[in-house]
């Protein structure tokens, strides 16, 4: 039996206001996250020699990489995936989102805790658990990490054919992933679940990292502001407009995060029996009241908010279910036991 560490989370029935609680150790990653502390660059370089060309000495005299350089970030991610997760081949097209792996891993670990909390403290593992990744992206990062950590099965969806093609190339180039990760294009960009899921499909979890911004201009402005705050705007140096790259659908949509998550909630209510726990990252805490209101209106029976942190970066996800306690018990017995 695998007992997850205790982490505060807010749990409420839908009619009650849900308020997030801070993580037990502010700024720290989940205890099961492999990316605690400083990286061992000699070990990373030994495994991925191409990383050596991108290593710099930061102002604190420590080895690091230049996170303003998209090529450096891509090679760094490739090295992390190889050393920590055994992903030998990983690449993404130019200008696609290159995700921060520690934060992505945290979302999955806390989702595992969510499943354990309604399974007697035991994290369900293996092919019996199926997860839907909404907006899998060209990087396919959640299925890669989730399968390596918990051996879960994944369906990754995306509206962009190029993103699906890239994700498929990653899966096909790593032996053993093809049987665990399925990729499917959502052909109607106006919908999320409708037209994507088959009537008999069931998922234990859905996860989503929604587009953050409401427009391309807002995305560009936000990135420049981030560099300014970090003291990295050097007039003598040409920095990328977007810090980790990203295509339009990855970065912005009409109405931004709030509008996307509202649509996600509305559509989840149309397939309430096909997913045990729906979830979405919520980057802006100011969006939470609207999310809770939409969930109440949609008829969610249980809502949980989990705070996460990586250094100074604060984030969270909201999870909800339309299943009663009795239905959740039947679900566990049918699928996990």
Image: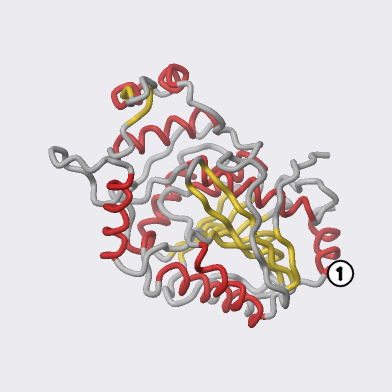
Q: Residue at x 45, y 43 (%)?
A: 100
Does residue 271 lie above or below 135 as drawn?
A: below
Judged from the image, the secondary structure of the residue bearing numbered disc 1 is helix
**Residue reaching furthest to the left:** 236
Q: Which residue is drawn at 33% across and 51% down?
A: 96
In terms of image quadrants, where is residue 196? bottom right
Does residue 288 lie above or below 28 as drawn?
A: below
Q: Which residue is drawn at 51% across and 57% down?
A: 183
110 left or right, relative to 184: right
Residue 270 in view (yes/no): yes
The image quadrant where one finds the N terminus is top right
Residue 93 in view (yes/no): no
Sort mark 1 into few (<14), some (14-19) or many (20+) by Cα contacts within 10 Å.
few
Q: Which residue is drawn at 55% across and 46% down?
A: 309
Does residue 80 lie above or below 12 as drawn?
A: above
Measured as percent of width and height from the top left, residue 333 is found at 86, 59
| Color encoding of the figure | secondary structure
Does residue 256 lie above or below 242 as drawn?
A: below
In front: 300, or 249? 300
Q: Name the residue under label 1.
A: 326
Number of disc labels: 1
In front: 30, or 198? 30
In terms of image quadrants, where is residue 163? bottom left
317 left or right, relative to 218: right
Measured as percent of width and height from the top left, residue 170 is found at 45, 44
Measured as percent of width and height from the top left, residue 143 is found at 55, 49
177 left or right, relative to 109: left
Measured as percent of width and height from the top left, residue 122 is found at 80, 46
């Amino acid at each position: 039996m695998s007992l997850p560490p205790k982490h505060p989370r807010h749990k409420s029935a839908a009619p009650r206001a849900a308020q997030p609680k801070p993580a037990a150790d502010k700024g720290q990653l989940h205890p099961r996250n492999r990316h605690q502390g400083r990286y061992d660059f000699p070990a990373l370089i030994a495994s991925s020699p191409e990383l050596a060309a991108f290593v710099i000495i930061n102002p604190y005299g420590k080895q690091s990489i230049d996170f303003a350089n998209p090529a450096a970030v891509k090679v760094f991610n490739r090295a992390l995936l190889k050393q920590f997760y055994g992903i030998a081949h990983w690449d993404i097209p130019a200008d696609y989102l290159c995700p921060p792996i520690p934060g992505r891993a945290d979302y999955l670990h806390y989702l595992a805790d969510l499943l354990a909390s309604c399974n007697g403290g035991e994290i369900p593992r293996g092919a019996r658990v199926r997860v839907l990744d909404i907006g899998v992206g060209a990087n396919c990062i959640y299925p890669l990490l989730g399968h390596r950590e918990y051996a879960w099965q994944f369906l990754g969806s995306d509206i962009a054919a190029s993103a699906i093609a890239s994700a498929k190339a990653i899966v096909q180039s790593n032996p053993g992933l093809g049987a665990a990760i399925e990729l499917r294009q959502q052909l109607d960009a106006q919908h999320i679940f409708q037209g994507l899921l088959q009537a008999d499909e069931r998922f234990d979890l859905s996860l989503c990292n929604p587009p953050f911004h409401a427009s391309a201009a807002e995305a560009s402005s936000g990135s420049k502001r981030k560099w300014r705050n970090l003291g990295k705007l050097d007039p003598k140096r040409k920095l990328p407009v977007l810090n980790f790259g990203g295509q339009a659908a990855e970065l912005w949509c009409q109405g931004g995060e709030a509008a996307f998550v509202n649509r996600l909630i509305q559509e989840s209510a149309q397939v309430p029996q096909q997913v045990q726990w729906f979830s979405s990252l919520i980057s802006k805490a100011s969006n939470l009241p609207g999310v809770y209101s939409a969930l109440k209106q949609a008829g969610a029976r249980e809502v949980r908010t989990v705070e996460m942190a990586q250094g100074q970066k604060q984030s969270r996800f909201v999870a909800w279910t339309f299943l009663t306690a009795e239905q959740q018990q039947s679900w566990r017995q049918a699928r996990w036991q």
